[in-house]
Amino acid sequence: MLTSHEYDVDSVRRVDQLPPLHAEWDALGTQCGGFLPSFQWFYSAAQGLYEEGNLRVIVVRRLGEVVAIAPLAHTLS
């Protein structure tokens, strides 16, 4: 975890680490006007498409509240 004065940045790399983010993820998605894919959509994709350890979900918290999520995945071509 990376920490600044007000922000904490975490990287989620395993599918089993995603469920605790469900409510905060969907709330942030609603605040963003649907720009962020829904938790369920990304969770289903992550379970079916990516090998364990290939996720790169960046979660930024400000004073304990999720303010940004970047759902990414690492793939080799």
Image: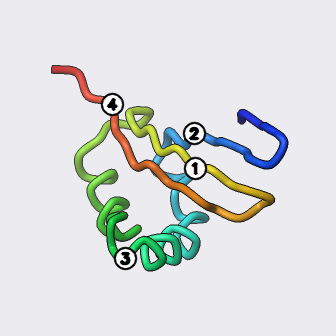
For label 1, the residue is: 59
- Horizontal side of residue 65 vs 71, given as left or right: right
Callout 3: helix, strand or loop?
A: loop
For label 2, the residue is: 11
Residue 50 drawn above or below residue 28: above
Q: Tell whether label 2 touches label 1 (CB within 8 Å).
A: yes
The disc, 3 or 4, on the residue closer to the chain's N-terminal end is: 3
The disc, 1 or 2, on the residue closer to the chain's N-terminal end is: 2
Residue 54 x, y percent position in the rendering: 38, 33
The disc, 1 or 4, on the residue closer to the chain's N-terminal end is: 1
Callout 1: helix, strand or loop?
A: strand
Q: What residue occupies the far left of the structure in this picture? A: 77
Q: Nearer the viewer, mark 1 or mark 4?
A: 1
At label 2, the amino acid type is Ser
For label 4, the residue is: 74
Task: Give the alpha-carbon distance from disc 1 to disc 2, as whole Å.
Answer: 6 Å
